[in-house]
Image (cartoon, grey):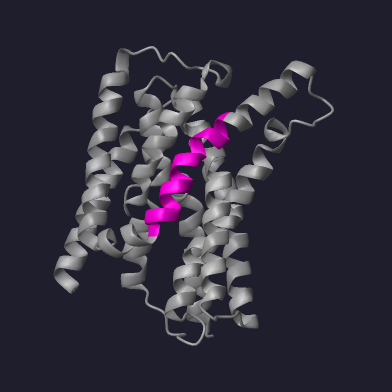
Amino acid sequence: MNLLEWIRIVLIGIIEGITEWLPISSTGHMLLFDELFTTQAPKVFTEQFSEMFMVVIQLGAILAVVTLYFNKLNPWAKSKSVQQKKNTYSLWGKVIVGCLPAAVFGLLFDDWMEAHFGDHVTIAVMLILYGVLFILLEYRNRNREFSIQRFSQMTYKTALIIGLIQILSLVPGTSRSGVTILGAMLIGCSRYIAAEYTFYLAIPVMFGASGLKVVKYLLKGNSFTGEQVLVMAVAMVIAYAVSVLAIKFLVGYIKKHDFTVFGYYRIALGILVLVCFGLFL
């Protein structure tokens, strides 16, 4: 591959690292990026490899969560008291409960949803729709006291409701982090708890999605060339590094601000998708 292709891979890793955690839809950004920067290396980026690649590079982003929150997620840490260890087990239980609905529906309908709703119009509409919802919800939250300020206050019922809401992220353009944050705040979670919980939900969800994509890829008789392995490794490392920065930014940002700016950004991006694809396709 030439230098331009490697620049493309670096940019994909950066986009993944940023958009996976901010509630602005990685799908919408990747759609625009692919339109503006198409590949010139068909031997590496075959159609099936490209589809699998866009999912598997999420592993780099996931490792950023594991790194940043390792102590909080580790129930065997020697520094934790007995009660803290129980709280950690409870947190993992709520993460598992929150993941089950998306896992079941994802296995059954993920390919169907992408095939029927993966067009640019659907993605643009979802970007705009959830952008409006963010703005309206934050307007409602101006004088609201959130009832769930700590994970110990989150019940398994609440976790399940958020998990059911997460199913909506199967529609391209919705944003997994965006819809879970919206849903969590809607039922009383603070911005911080909503954001952190969506980080944790991503660990099993995205590990499962990546593993499933690799298995499907191999079952179709495909294999990996050395260059393809290198491409994935480079993209994942970049996604990891950028994700660390993006997560730290988001956590720091929501301590002083709300999600309104992300709502306006989504609306602008949705309009841009409609304009670009309306003019050039």
Q: Determine the residue located farthest toward the bottom in the rendered image.
A: 43
What residue sits 22% from the left and 46% below the top? 128
What residue sits 18% from the left and 59% below the top? 274
The location of residue 90, given as percent across then percent down, is: 63, 25
What residue sits 62% from the left and 83% below the top? 225
Asked if 67 appears above or below 89 in the picture, the reply is: below
The location of residue 133, given as percent across then percent down, is: 25, 34
Q: Is residue 16 magenta?
A: no
Q: Nearer the viewer, residue 62 or 254?
A: 62
The location of residue 86, given as percent across then percent down, is: 71, 21
258 lies left or right of 206: left
Asked if 51 appears above or below 225 in the picture, the reply is: above
The location of residue 87, given as percent across then percent down, is: 67, 21
Would you say the magenta stretch is mainly helix, strand or loop? helix
Is there any visible trace of residue 11 in the rendered image? no
Q: Is residue 99 magenta?
A: yes
What residue sits 38% from the left and 25% below the top? 185
Q: Nearer the viewer, residue 92 or 227?
A: 92
147 lies left or right of 225: left
Q: Which residues are magenta?
A: 94-110
Asked if 171 appears above or below 184 in the picture, the reply is: below
251 lies left or right of 181: right
Q: Determine the residue located farthest toward the left in the rendered image.
A: 279
Is there any visible trace of residue 13 in the rendered image? yes
Q: Quadrant of the C terminus?
A: bottom left
